[in-house]
Amino acid sequence: MAVVKEMFEDLHDRIDAGPTLGSGTSGNYVADVTSGNGLTKTSSAGEGQTVDLAVDITGATDGTGIVVDGANDLVLLYDADATAVKKVKTSQIAEPADVHPFLVMGG
C-alpha cells in the first residue's frame, strides 16, 4: 500500500508543478499573430518561438482628411540622432520653416 501512496504523491507533484513551456509541451502555445495595416510579422508560429513584429509606416492607411488633435494625438517618429523610434505628440513637431522661393535651388 505504501508503494501506491508514493505513486499517487509523485503523480500529484508532477501535475501540481505543471509542464515547462518550450520543453515539456508539444504544439504552439502562441498559435499565430496576424499582421496588417502597417504591422509586419517576420517569424512563424512554433513552440518556444519568439514572435517578431515590425512597424512599416508605408503600409499604414492614408490619413488625409483627419482632424489632428495636437494636444493628444501621437505619432511615431524616427529619431536619427538616437537611432530609435519614439512616440511624440503632434504638437512637438516643429512647423516647416518658410523658405523664399528665390532661395530654393534646383527646383
Image (spheres, helix red, strand yellow):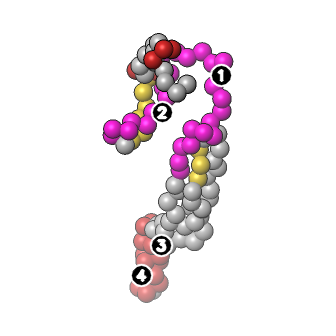
Of labels 3 and 4, earlier in sequence is: 4
Which of these two is toward me, 70 or 51?
70
Picture quadrant where residue 63 is located: top right
User: What type of secondary structure mainly makes up the magenta span?
Assistant: loop
Which residue is denoted by mark 2 in the rendering?
76
In terms of secondary structure, where does tag 4 sit? helix
Q: Which residues are magenta?
A: 53-82
Q: Position of residue 73 (x, y in %)?
A: 50, 21
Q: Residue flagged by tag 3: what amino acid is it?
A: Ser
- Are the two marked residues, 1 and 4, in contact with CB atoms closer than 8 angstroms? no
In terms of secondary structure, where does tag 3 sit? loop
Per the model, the C-alpha gap separating discs 3 and 4 is 26 Å
Near mark 3 (Cα within 10 A), the count class, few <14, some 14-19 or many ≥20, is: few
Which of these two is toward me, 103 or 21?
103
Q: Position of residue 65 (x, y in %)?
A: 66, 18
Label ID, residue 41:
none
Residue 91 showing in the rendered view: no
- Are the two marked residues, 3 and 4, in contact with CB atoms closer than 8 angstroms? no
Picture quadrant where residue 30 is located: bottom right
Q: Position of residue 72 (x, y in %)?
A: 47, 18
Per the model, the C-alpha gap separating discs 2 and 4 is 59 Å
Which of these two is toward me, 19 or 85?
85
Q: Residue flagged by tag 4: what amino acid is it?
A: Glu
